[in-house]
Image (spheres, helix red, strand yellow):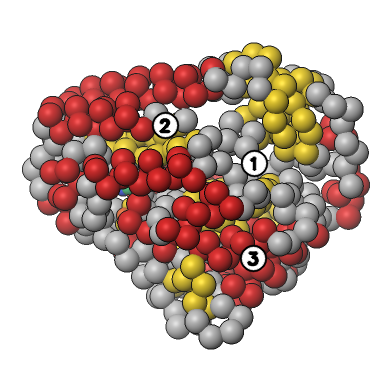
Amino acid sequence: MSNPETTQGKAAPELSEARKVYIKTYGCQMNVYDSERMADILAAEGYKSAETPEDADLVLLNTCHIREKAAEKVYSEIGRLRALKARARGDGRAMKIAVAGCVAQAEGAEILKRAQSVDVVVGPQSYHRLPALLKAGKRAVETEFPAESKFDHMPEPGFRNMRLPGDRPQPLLQQQAGLPRHAAAFLTVQEGCDKFCTFCVVPYTRGAEFSRPVARIVEEAEALAARGVKDVMLLGQNVNAYHGAGPAAGAWPLARLLARLSEISGIERLRYTTSHPRDMSDDLIAAHRDLPKLMPYLHLPAQSGSDRILALMNRRHDRNFYLRLVERLRRARPDLALSGDFIVGFPGETEADFSATLDLVRAVGYAQAYSFKYSPRPGTPAAGEAQVPDAVKAERLQRLQALLDEGQAAFNAKMLGREFDLLLEKPGKRPGQLVGRSPWLQAVHVDAPESLIGAMVKVAVDRIGSNSLFGALVDPPRAVA
Ligand code: 5AD
Ligand code: SF4
């Protein structure tokens, strides 16, 4: 199919002459990681980053489909971009629009039908095909789950020479060297999910579970360390189901991968997300006791506290299993900060079911957690069930969030006067201030010179804010290597 938007009007320069991309990312950390990899791929093709969509020859929307009205939001963003594209064409420039990520996967060719201005639609498993699709010059959809892995078609880690919107400002020297320098980075080790919770689109948009081989992950982590990364968050939709091919025969579980990554000098902190309670194996629990680099933080979604709802959700765990698991984890690592996800108003949820969720939240004592109103995802089993009225969902969400906020405030309040290592990541809101993450993933603000971005420093907490902590440097700060 030809694209009327690009074949009409003034002769536009070929894409190969005009190469600036603007990538807008929605949704989860895995999308952030994917956007970085797409930036790597496009950088290898000669693209530079555009500061704004107006300035871009290619606007790439990396979309999320997990919750409400995701597709509608993408269509309205495309509507806004259509005007930019028309203006660019008026100026004799060809601007392309590409849609990637989970909405691209779920909607596929429908996007090309509904939005004439979109040139390329590419699913999360095939974005390594992006340059070829762009070069082909035809409107195209690629949402297959190809036999070859996109991970085998990536440029060398660290190739990226562009900044993405939302990237942190870089020290000048690094900018001149063209290398982004972050103290913390994401690393995808696993993708997809075979669990089929009845509310969730992930098994359909991201496909079957797939684990990257150990050697590839180690290489990527070493490259990150060489770039000055000290803190690595391993990503996967069901990360603790990881079972990647080891260097010799046999697959490695996540615990063994974490132990191996702990050996990399320069990497000082490791975390992983998101975990399923059923895949929290004994060796992984033991890793929280045995690996000093594994930070005392775990995102462990429960989704509900009611056994009846957990069964309807096909969660494969009940309330008791979850609570016992938390106990075992805390025995292994007493200061573990727990985080979670909850859904309110799942079809059939009664006030008693919801109370059971509130009870679970009280029993666990989360450091922080996310909560959502159930939203039917087309194609998932629960979407066809009778829905809880929105007003009831809204009211339950409010109550749950108030309780979670209370829990978070209580967890943060315990930090007053505590000393710990802080990894300084970026400038704070006020001049002279930097922000970093505590071992428990709280944001901590301190007065410190910009030269300390990327440094691990000791801080003492002297004030508790509503969502973050404030502290002061304790020792004379160590210089950045
Ligand atoms: N409705 C509401 N929340 C959802 N989540 C996933 N699917 C849905 C849905 N259909 C939430 C779950 C999951 C998090 C990433 O998003 O809590 O853990
Ligand atoms: Fe979705 Fe997580 Fe359930 Fe997999 S385990 S289906 S990703 S909620």
* Mark earlier in primary sequence (2, 1): 1
Q: Which residue is mark 3?
A: 260
Q: In the image, residue 455 lies at what x, y percent?
A: 81, 39
* Mark earlier in primary sequence (3, 1): 1
Which quadrant of the picture is home to ligand 1?
top left
Say which of marks 2 and 1 sits in front: 2
* The one of 438 and 192 positioned closer to us in this rendering: 438
Residue 373 shows up from this direction: no
Say which of marks 3 and 1 sits in front: 3
The answer to whether mark 2 is within 8 Å of ligand 1 is no
Q: Is residue 246 above or below residue 398?
A: below
Which residue is rendered at x = 65% and y = 35% of the image? 437
Q: Which residue is mark 2?
A: 366
SS assignment at label 2: loop
Q: Quadrant of the N terminus?
A: bottom left
SS assignment at label 3: helix
Residue 431 shows up from this direction: yes
Q: In the image, residue 178 lies at what x, y percent?
A: 84, 55
